[in-house]
Every structure is written in C-alpha cells, then in structure tokens.
Amino acid sequence: MLYRTVPSTGAPLSILGFGAMRLPQKDGVIDRPAARSTLAAALAGGITLLDTAWPYHGGESEPFLGEALAGVPRESYALMTKLPCWLVKTREDLASYLPRQLERLGTAYLDYYLLHSLDRGSWATMCELGALAYLEEARDEGLIRHVGFSFHDDLPTFRRIVDAHPWDVCLIQYNYLDQSFQAGSAGLAYAVSKGIGVMVMEPLRGGALASPVPPEVQAAWDRAPVRRSPAAWALRWVWDHPGVVSVLSGMGSVSQVEENCATAREAHPGALSPREHEAVREAASAYRSLLRVACTGCRYCLPCPEGVDIPSCFELYNARYLFKDERAPEKYATWLCGGGENAPSDVSLCTQCGKCVVRCPQGLDIPTLLGEVDRDLREKDAGGH
Ligand code: SF4
Ligand code: SF4
C-alpha cells in the first residue's frame, strides 16, 4: 500500500480508502460474516482510511463498523463519517447526529467528520444553522479531529464552500468520465491550491467503469501498451493526480479488496505514460458515445412516492446501448411493468412530482429522462437510435 499526506495535518493515509457503502449483502441486509472478512482483508492490505455515513445500508453501515472494529487498535486506522445535512432542519438536529454516530461506531472520536453531500441549498442551510461553529466546537471537545465536506453541485458552488472555511479535506466525485463534472479537475486543482486534502469518491462511477465494460471500451484497453483490468485503469488514472490523497472504493468482496490493494501498491503520482493517458482518453470517448443516462445507481432518489424503480429503469436503458442488451425491453416489461410476479414499478407510475430530482447527486432531470426510457424500452427495436 502507498500512503499520501493530508496537507493540513501531515497525517499519512492509505491512498485506497474502504468505503462501507457497498458491503456484501444477503437477503437485503449486510452479510456480516462476509463483510467482516472484506474489512479484515482491507486492514491486512494496509488500508488505514475507513469511510461510512449515517444512511449507508439503511443506517446499518455505522453500527456494523462499530462491531467489526471492536478489538482493532483505534490508532491503527482513521475513521470518517458524515453529518446527513439533508436531514438537518434545526440547530437541535445539527447537534443530534454526532453523539449517535460515535455511539454506533463505538468510538470516542472521529478522525474525519464531513458535511455530507453539500450543494448550494444544503450549504445555505448549514450556514444559517451555524454548522461551521458547531464543527469547531466538536473539534475543541475532542469528538472530531479533522473537518471536511463531500460535494455534489457545480464548480462555482464548490469554490464558495472551499473559501468559507479552513477545511482539512474535501470529498469529490472524480473519475476519467467526470473530469469536467461538478468540482472536476478545476475544483480539484482549486482545493489543492488552498491546502485541502482531496479525497475522491465514485472512482469507478458506481462500478460502471469496472468489468464487464462495453466491447468498445475494452477495445481501447486492449490497444493500450500495458495490460490492466478496467477497474485498475480507472483507479490508476485517479491516483495519477498528485493532489489526490485517498480514493474511496466501496468494495464488496475480499477479491475486490485484494485486486484494488494490488493496484494501489504501484500507483505513484504521475506514473502513467503519455501513451497510457491516450488509452484512457480513448476509453472515455467510447464510453461517452454509448452511455444514455449518467446514473451511478446510488439510489439516493428512492423511495419514489409512486414506487418507480428509477435506477433500474436507467440501468436497463443504459444496458441496451452499452452492452447491446437486446432483452432490455423484455426485462422492462417483465421486471418493471408488472408482466412478471413483481408489482409494477415502471415509468407509467410517475406523476412528475420532482421529489427525486432534488435528491439526485448527479443533477439528472429524472422525470424527463424516464420519459425517454419508457419510449425507448417499449420499442423492441433499438436500431433507429
Ligand atoms: S418525479 Fe416521478 S419518479 Fe420522481 S419521485 Fe416523482 S413520481 Fe417518482
Ligand atoms: S437517478 Fe440519481 S439519485 Fe437515482 S440512482 Fe441514479 S444517480 Fe443516484
């Protein structure tokens, strides 16, 4: 494992962080024995940054980490969780989460506490409620050591938030498809110029950049001068940036941990050659020409009050074009439109209420895109597209 330093603290962190949001599951809940093995493999592989958040796994991620880390020396890892800003409406709310999060995690302090998923609206609320003063009080009391924020909005908003406080870290979405999206490369450079440690989420875009990738993308990797898995290419591209301190990956199995740790062992900044960067540009271009909806499958838009399974609609639509899945219309009819045993969860239920739109970190115009999905997947032949 390689380690990089958070500028404001001098603290070394593993360049690969363990994101506890895609733990192995069984019957819809965390498969605790498998999740414990996955976490143990991460610690054995040299990972020192463990990341979770209040809502992950329906609120079970923090308690799971608390149980699984009992007995592991506390100073051997850095623990990071986040204040669920969208649930905070009053000053009482603001102060109500941290004590419960410490209890769930079975720890007296957090190494990193982040304002979760800031956008212009939640940032305005946080400012109004005095969140920055609250974070500093919590730091003075020794409950948290370092403060930061995770972010989903545009670049001007990102700069405003960066400028508002001497943050230790920020967490941005960054991968070879999202270089100009949200904070993007410009935001990363800006945060670095202000001495903020940049952590990266969605390096594999919700798994879409890992295997299996569309044949056109695989062809770009096959032409590259070095053999790597698609996931290893995507991670190496992010780590090539010297300003990135740590990359969070939601790893769901021991084998994923082992593969990512192996990649991390050689990911020195600036190590990719011009020819390797060219291969990444080719892969990105192939991806962009095929992808219909930039949904990462995070499920933050759910539940829809009418029961529309939004991420599955987008997944089937993308699969039709990324992977030429000719059965996508049939799957839509059977799985989502009530043709099988499941209750309907297709686009026809949508009332265009817009509740999902404000929750989507990708800023997708979900109702409009759903209309496109429905028109497309009700046609058997994708040849005209
Ligand atoms: S706009 Fe449609 S999909 Fe979104 S929450 Fe409302 S009913 Fe559900
Ligand atoms: S539509 Fe948006 S919120 Fe819903 S799963 Fe996709 S990216 Fe996440």
Image (cartoon, rainbow, N blue to C red):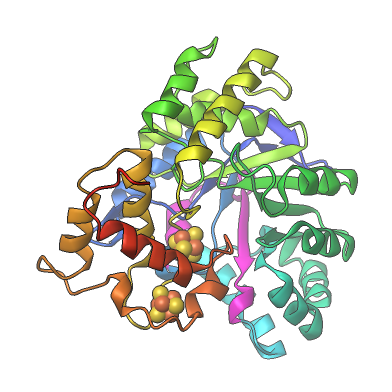
Q: Residue at x 53, y 14 (%)?
A: 224
| Residue 37: x %, y % from top left | 36, 42
Quarter occupied by residue 167: bottom right
> Which quadrant of the render holds ligand 1?
bottom left
Quarter occupied by residue 139: bottom right
Q: Residue furthest top?
A: 225
- Residue 240 colored magenta? no
Q: Residue furthest front?
A: 384
Q: Residue at x 69, y 27 (%)?
A: 240
The image quadrant where one finds the N terminus is top right
Between 31 and 139, the one lying in front of the other is 31
Q: Residue at x 56, y 33 (%)?
A: 284
- Relative to 264, say whether 82 is above or below: below
Between 191 and 181, the one lying in front of the other is 181
| Residue 221: x %, y % from top left | 48, 20
- Relative to 251, say whether 220 is above or below: above
In the image: residue 80, left or right of residue 339 = right
Q: From which residue to which does the magenta span run?
A: 60-87
Q: Residue at x 69, y 18 (%)?
A: 271
Regarding residue 224, the answer to whether it shows in the image is: yes
Between 236 and 365, the one lying in front of the other is 365
- Relative to 158, say whether 306 is above or below: below
| Residue 15: x %, y % from top left | 64, 35
Regarding residue 273, the answer to whether it shows in the image is: no
Counting every numbered tag in the picture gives: 0
| Residue 242: x %, y % from top left | 76, 31
In the image: residue 280, left or right of residue 328 = right
